[in-house]
Amino acid sequence: MERCGWVGDDDLYRAYHDTEWGVPEYDSRALWEKLILDGFQAGLSWITILRKRDAFREAFQGFDPNIIATWGEPEVQRLLANPGIVRHRGKIEATIGNALVWQRIEAEQGFDRYLWEYVDGTPVQNQWARLDEVPAYTEISTAISKDLRKRGFKFCGPTIVYAFMQAVGMVNDHLTTCPCREQVARRGR
């Protein structure tokens, strides 16, 4: 048995794969943080975001969407000057707007319930043997992306949403040869 082929030799990447990636996440705030980080990853490698994740968490005050929703241009300028994060004005401004969308969804039904309803509350257990079988997006990620964008969310295209779904365990895309596959499968609701 060997890890999923995308992991490589980096210890940080291995730890992320082995302990976090694909593990079902049901906390609304944590789900939002992961979706935001996946949006920041667009155009970059995930290892870049992992290496900066602690700095992101500090800069974005623990990714508390209720705090971030109150931010404006002074906070944008502060973040643009922070070398510890990805300094992209569009992504920073989107994060503030996305916090407002999160608040509305959270008040309506809970961000966690909103997302998990797309998979009937249970992780989809895929059976991929090779990396080239894993899709970049699916009908479900496309539907989530479309609805989020309709609500005003940004940096949430179908490919970003599918990567997010993999990360938070809405789909188990550990390869059938990966030792983490069964561990993750047992952790679903």
Image (cartoon, rainbow, N blue to C red):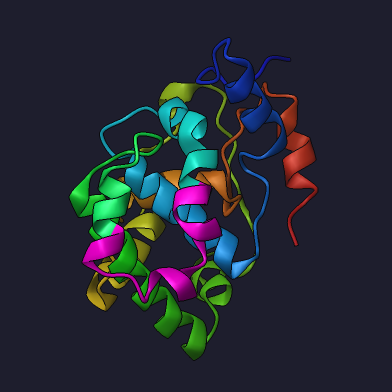
Q: Residue at x 73, y 55 (%)?
A: 188
Q: Residue at x 24, y 54 (%)?
A: 77
Between 67 and 184, the one lying in front of the other is 67
Between 104 and 125, the one lying in front of the other is 104
Classify 170 as above or below 172.
below
Between 7 and 95, the one lying in front of the other is 95
Quadrant placement of the C terminus: bottom right
Classify 114 as above or below 15.
below
- In the rendering, at what x and y percent does residue 31 appear? 54, 60
- In the rendering, at what x and y percent does residue 76 appear? 26, 57
Magenta stretch: give its range: 57-75
Quadrant placement of the N terminus: top right
- In the rendering, at what x and y percent does residue 4 appear? 59, 22
Q: Main secondary structure of the magenta part?
A: helix
Residue 133 location, quadrant: top left
Residue 119 falls within the magenta-colored stretch: no
Left or right position of 176 against 118:
right
Q: Residue at x 21, y 65 (%)?
A: 73
Residue 101 location, quadrant: bottom left
Left or right position of 56 against 62:
left
Residue 74 falls within the magenta-colored stretch: yes
Left or right position of 109 against 160:
right
Q: Is residue 36 visible?
A: yes
